[in-house]
Amino acid sequence: MGAQKKSGARVSEEADELVRVPLQAILLADSFTTKFRPITLERPKVLLPLVNVPMINYTLTWLESAGVEEVFVFCCSHSKQVINYLHNSDWLSQPNFTVSTIESQNSVSAGDALRVVYERNVIHGDFVLISGDTVSNMSLTQALLEHKERKKKDSNAVMTMVIKRSKPNPAIHQSRLGTDELFMAIDPNTKQLLYYEDRADQSKGTLHLDKSLLVDNPSLSLHHDKQDCYIDICSPEVLSLFTDNFDYQHLRRHFVKGLLLDDIMGYKIFVHEIHSDYAARIDNFRSYDTVSKDIIHRWTYPLVPDVMNFGNSVTKLERQGIYRASEISQSQSAVIGPCTVIGSGTKIGNNTKISNSVIGEGCKIGSNVIIEGCYIWDNISIEDGCKLQHAIVCDGVIIKSGAVLEPGVILSFKVVVGPEFVVPPYSKVSLFQQPIEEDSDEELEYADSTSVIGSQMETSDVEIASQVLETHFSPASELGMGGAGHVWLTCEGGHEEEWRHSVAPIPKDKILEAIKIMEDDLELTHDDSFFPPSGELKPNSNDSDDDDHEDSRDDSYYFEKEVEATFLRAVHENIQESHLILEINSLKLSYNKLTADCAGAVFYAMMKYALDTPHSSADSLLQNVQVVFTKWKKVLTSYLTDIDEQIEIILKFEEMCSESAKEYATLFTRILHYFYNEDVVEEDAILSWEDEKKDADEADKVFVKQAQHLIQWLKEASEEDDDDQE
Amino acid sequence: MDFQVVVLGGGVSKKLLPLVSQELPNALLPVANRPVLSYVLEYLELSNLKDLIVVVEGEEVALHVGAWISGAYADRLHVEVAAVPEDVGTAGAIRAISHHLTAKDILVVSGDLVTDVPLGAVAATHRRHDAVVTAMLCAAPVSGPSESVSSGGKDKTKKPGRYDLIGLDPTKQFLVHIATGAEVEKDLRIQKSMLPAVGQIEIRADLMDAHLYAFKRSVLQEVLDRKSAFHSLKHDVLPYLVRSQLKSEVVLSGMPQAEENRTEKVTSQSNQQMLSQILANASEPTFHLQHSLGPYGSISDQRIHKCCVYIAGSSKYCTRLNSIQAYNDINRDVIGEASHLSGYSYSAQNNVIHPSAELGAKTTIGPHCMLGEGSQMGDKCSVKRSVIGRHCRIGANVKVVNSVVMNHVTIGDSCSIQGSVICSNVQLQERAVLKDCQIGAGFVVAAGSECKGEVLAKK
């Protein structure tokens, strides 16, 4: 029996193996950012040539070689272009490697994309999540194995992130890929990711880790020397997590951080570090430059120009890292320097010097041209005597004779640079007008980046073409005589940071500047006031107390403001009382306030409104108050459940009279009496208010004295009541 | 080793009340019937360090400690006992005896340390890196103190097993972050400037600062002079040195050659310096050096100093007697698993019974027990994992488990003692039952009383 059972179990295990779904991958053919603008206005990022091969080919080639059997390409902006490209390529007809596309027009983030994929219900097992701009040659086997092992032991291990060692420059706080420095905390034994911070606040000298991290983990390593490769191995739960948390947008900022902070569900993320393999994502122009150089230097083998043959011509590797395609016509006197790629059908004129650059197909380069560190795409004509340094030049650009491109220039499609024109450093030039300056808010960054412009582009091509024609003929263009294109303004304050993400190497002076800042920082950290002189941490704890006070004060202030705004809206839009109460209740919860605070705030808002309503005399002011209270009394009384709250509003009223709304000062007793009549405040509240004020300063007693008459009357009345009862 | 040694004997610690008193200060608290200070002194003697300065708090304590040392070690060690005022802290203690310090390096040992970690290795680490301070780290005790803390003293909610947070560089040779005392319970704050320089910091909560430091004398004295507010070596001086290692404020005598020809910012020069550093240290260029060379090979005018660590192997014993829980643990360990520390020879039953002790009929003394000179036990007694001092009189049918009984204690018939500490001259009348109690010296426990988790002492 036992033996049979055993074998039965084995069979089912094998059956599990048999029904094992093929390894799937989701390839996001949209980066949901605007970093490659203006180029990405016309062509999706994944189709931009990287060393003369569209980026998506690198990603697909790697997925195929890594053993992925089914890829879903998620297209969003310029989706037609991506789909057409894939249809015309060989990718859709590979054996053992199916590529299918998922199109969505209204996704504005990776989170949306994954939600769409989830709805399609096409992912059945573990999958690789990758963006279409990733270049890698790593082997997935080990990482997959680790992921599956962990998953077997702990069903909460939903994701494995691939990381790689890469030390960012300490002075300028960014890696060689131009990405921000990344702080990660990893459990050295289990490789669990515990903390992830990619947009650390530079101004603070210290990094804060929550103490709870160390309670659970006796040791953890804090890494600053790792780079996120943006290759994730995910369990199917990841997709449903995105669906459950509909506010997750960004893969790292929202999803990863969300999971790390959420200790209820207990989902865990692990890391897999690669050592000798290559993996990098092209996030910005600097990483475009870096990755291109890595490809030319063959770090990405076998993803190098002479091995990757897409389409037509054969590229040959010569000495000093020079790659030449076929049918190049090159003048005898032209000098091709090291680490340069030249595409097929390109013509190079006399005495032209090219080094560390990539030249695409069918370009015409004149005589006496100097090209250094540039990325020249296809069908570009560069006339005689031009000088190009560290620039990206897109398809169809014409650079007239004698023009100069300073470092960091981006020329988008079909731009024409006039003769002898000098394009200033870091300018971005496009035939399109720069979209209207939007708030650089994150949400908008996603929103405007893709669908809106993208679809607009495709639908109104004709219109734009006519616009383009117009600019063509404007004689005094922004780009010199006969030039065509608009120089984009860098966003506010962005110019300073332009060098960070540019293709051009970082200028020396910036580095020196940064080093100086770094040293100053060190100095600052050594300020003893920052660290308490004694281990007792007394001064520090005082500090934090002060902070708390400040916070709570700010909090109350904002709370009052919010309540006031809500109340005014209710008045103007004639919202029902019950709805207003509901809204104030939600404010109360979100600010964590007491009912008394609400009463005070609502009262303040009402009195303020009465005061702001036009009035000629004290009497009309009193009338205003009466009008407001007749209408909205119910809102206030719903917070006056207790005598304490009533006292609170009397105190509040007193405060208003003496500070913010002195006009009420003379009316104090009358209004108080009115409140009493209207049952807003009860007799007990007024009496205990008086009681509370007994020991106060003379200055504080002004209003008590003013109300003495009323109080006296109340006391007598109550005595009479008592008498009556007896 | 031309190290000068300072033993910080402490005074009368509040955390150890009611076990300690003016007559029996921390340093003289018996561990397996020997003052705890003797473990440190013999530990130092093993490394051939015989010239010692023992600093204690208070004149009276100094008298007692001095008397004991001169009696026990007169012919073996040259010990100078110095008294400092109470509450000056460890930093204050060193400040007070600063004029006695002359050697290049100073070894500062806490008097309550019980360890067998090779001191030579710590000293070698210190010398090899030319460090300004080398701290010995050991594994934090696993059996967490229930009601006590390692330091700070105010925070009673501390979770077991967490004493210090220690940040190490990837080679585990350098100390790049330390949080002690009350800071441990706060959120971790790491200097941003440090992390890029090191690249990777390993934060360990399972290590503890053993309070054994090797300091460079010039640096230690300068820091103490300059920062008069510094009170404690562990909480102030060490974290300060760790924080400032990339931007040293202390003038280092004979530190990097880079200091002298700083003006020449030639790459070849810096390469040579790097080479000489490598040869001198016989190790990889450390992050300090890489940092000081700057990201582009030029020597930025940075002053650096190094804070090293020596991490005790897991097989070594290393504990500090700084709480009542630790006192119980150490006593148990010294007669148990770390028995080589006690210096006694064990019988076949794995226990130590003084020949002059008398045992009644059917009385059993289990393994890992100790019975001191001249003690008498009645019939049918049972002793397990406990230490019993000298000249105790124990009646019949008494059970002693996991406890420490000091000298001249009288225990009546049918008493039961578990997990407790009974100080000298205590009298337990018959049928007293004690569990997890501490009984101060000279206290009389009434017959038949039952106590659990109490502290009893004379007013």
Image (tube, coloured by chain):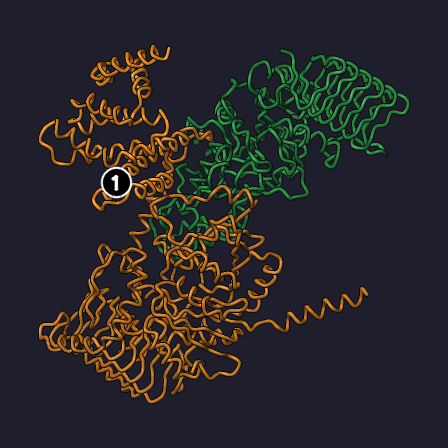
Q: Colour of chain B?
A: green
Q: Residue at x 48, y 61 (%)?
A: A240
Exactly how many numbered labels are in the figure? 1
Q: State which chain disc 1 sits on.
A: A
The part of the image, by quadrant, that contains residue B26 is top right
Amino acid at the residue labelled 1: Phe
Q: Position of residue B122 (x, y in %)?
A: 59, 40
Question: Up-down: is B374 above or below A177?
Answer: above
Residue neighbourhood size for the residue with mark 1, other residues' Cα within 10 Å, grouped as few (<14), some (14–19), many (≥20): many
Residue A338 in sight from this viewpoint? no
Q: Which residue is mark 1?
A: A567
A721 or B20, which is in the foreground? Answer: A721
Q: Is residue B73 left or right of residue A631?
A: right
Q: Is residue B363 left or right of residue B249?
A: right
B260 or A545, which is in the foreground? Answer: A545
Q: Residue at x 48, y 44 (%)?
A: B176
Q: Colour of chain A?
A: orange
Q: Quadrant of the C terminus of chain A?
A: top left
